[in-house]
Amino acid sequence: MANRGGFTSKLGFIMAAAGSAVGLGNIWGFPYEVGQGGGAAFVVIYLIFCFILCYPVMVTEIAIGRKTQKNPVGAFNDLGFKGWNIVGKLGIFSGVLILSFYNVIAGWAFGYIFEMIAGNFAVADKFGEYITAVFKVGLYGLVFMSVTAYVVSKGISGGIERAARLLMPTLIIMMLTLVIYSLTLPNSLDGLSFYLIPDFDKLTPSVIYNAMGQAFFSLSLGMGALITYGSYVNKSDNIISSAAFITLADVGIALLAGLMIFPLIGFMSEGTMEGAARGPGLIFVTLPQIFGSIGGGLGIAAGTTFFVLLCFAALTSTVSLLEVPVAYVVDELKVRRNRAVWLVAGFIFLIGIPSLIGNGYSDFFSTSFITYKEGGQDTDFLSFVAALANDSILPLGGCMIAFFASHIWKKHNLDEELAQGAPGYKGSFIQKYLNFAIGYFAPAVLATVFLFTVLFKFFGVHVF
Ligand code: PHE
């Protein structure tokens, strides 16, 4: 077998996997979901999902990857269940879809770095115009995709691991600086209490579905990204503790992002928290306005730091999204890595074009790309792809991966793999919990959430 390369250490793997998890989902998605989901109540539900449901799925993905040392399709074949490789195919398909629109948003964020450096805070009020200037933002997207491809082309240890080791600590330092700064502003405590004191009256079923989708997306689960990264992990590494660390890091960074943004909104709104529920525009519209009102050199420094850190976070995620189809093409179709990287990246950039132009530039792909007869919300192309990939395929994939590992591959095989590198695992409480969660709890909950989400998002049917 050709040498596929691998992570050089346990820490290298943890950094890369945490880098995959920490991304736009944490810094762009999480705060806006919190804002729309009524604050702290969303946070509580989200945390519960991450630890009791997502963590077991993460452990399973890494174990399948390490056992087989293959991409998500090859992994199922290798275990002897070819029919199940459909789960891997679905995962690769959704990864390609996710990267296609994720890169568009990353391109917007990349362009904002230059706007902030130029002190052009007014870009916030013209965000609609900014994203319809498709040649300009398309070029930013192209640059972002090229950097992603460059990192992936350098391989696992020389590219992905190296980038994560450099970018992740920098990101955390930048974030802590901004958190401390935002907590010193007037009215920041109002932001903090909105964020940290739950009001459970605000919990509706759709808040709960969103929290689930958000947890899956944010932890990079359900599409085989962690099967792929797991395939480069050392046999002597401890999967149980690595996965715990990755989950904690991801949740920790999402919480920090909230700690950075809500005090700023408290400051800007003079404590009313108006604007917190703005949705996806939160960091592209509200934040730059805030940096503008801080003004001067300090506003420029804070704004630039924020968008640089956002791009760093996005890059370690786009890299993992690209690695999945690349590993597939390299392992299964025997294409040279370098060539596979550029071909796949180019292809994904092209299928991202409807998402790029579907924000006002092209009527067809914008407001009413999908028009539902009744109930469902009309939506643009980007939101449609996101609803399909993030909210539907990821929970479905997670459900099938957990069910497969426990009942098809069998849980004693899974346990065997998990016990390697984790001496106290057998007979521990965590083993009992994982057996229950992976075998029954996760498949049941995820199947239900998948069904309800599809009925709700695509057919406008409210189950409860
Ligand atoms: N977890 C990443 C984020 O939060 C997105 C992602 C999803 C990356 C799925 C890889 C796989 O931004």
Image (tube, grey):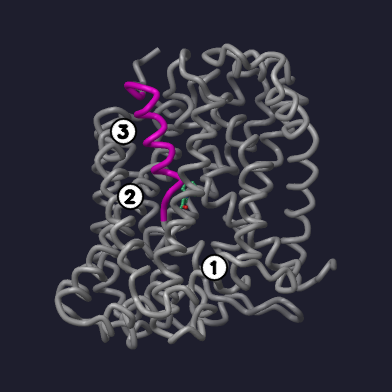
Task: Give the position of the N terminus as an image quadrant.
Answer: top left
Residue 317 part of the magenta segment: no
Which marked residue is nearer to the observer: mark 3 or mark 2? 2
Choose top left, top right, bottom left or bottom right for residue 150.
Answer: top left
Residue under pointer 3: 161
In this rendered view, identify the residue nearer to me: 141 or 285: 285
Q: Residue 265's x, y, as percent?
A: 43, 78
In the image, the segment drawn in magenta is 7-23
Choose top left, top right, bottom left or bottom right for residue 453.
Answer: bottom right
How packed is label 1: few (under 14 Cα within 10 Å), some, or many (20 or more)? many
Does residue 361 sit above or below 315 in this rendering?
below
Q: Whole-Å distance between the Cαs marked 2 and 1?
A: 20 Å
**113 relative position to 265: left or right:** left
For the point 66% across and 65% down, the residue is: 41
Indicate which disc residue 319 carries: none
> What amino acid is found at the position of numbered circle 3 in the picture?
Glu
In this rendered view, identify the residue nearer to me: 180 or 334: 180
Label located before the other in sequence (2 or 1): 2
Residue under pointer 2: 172
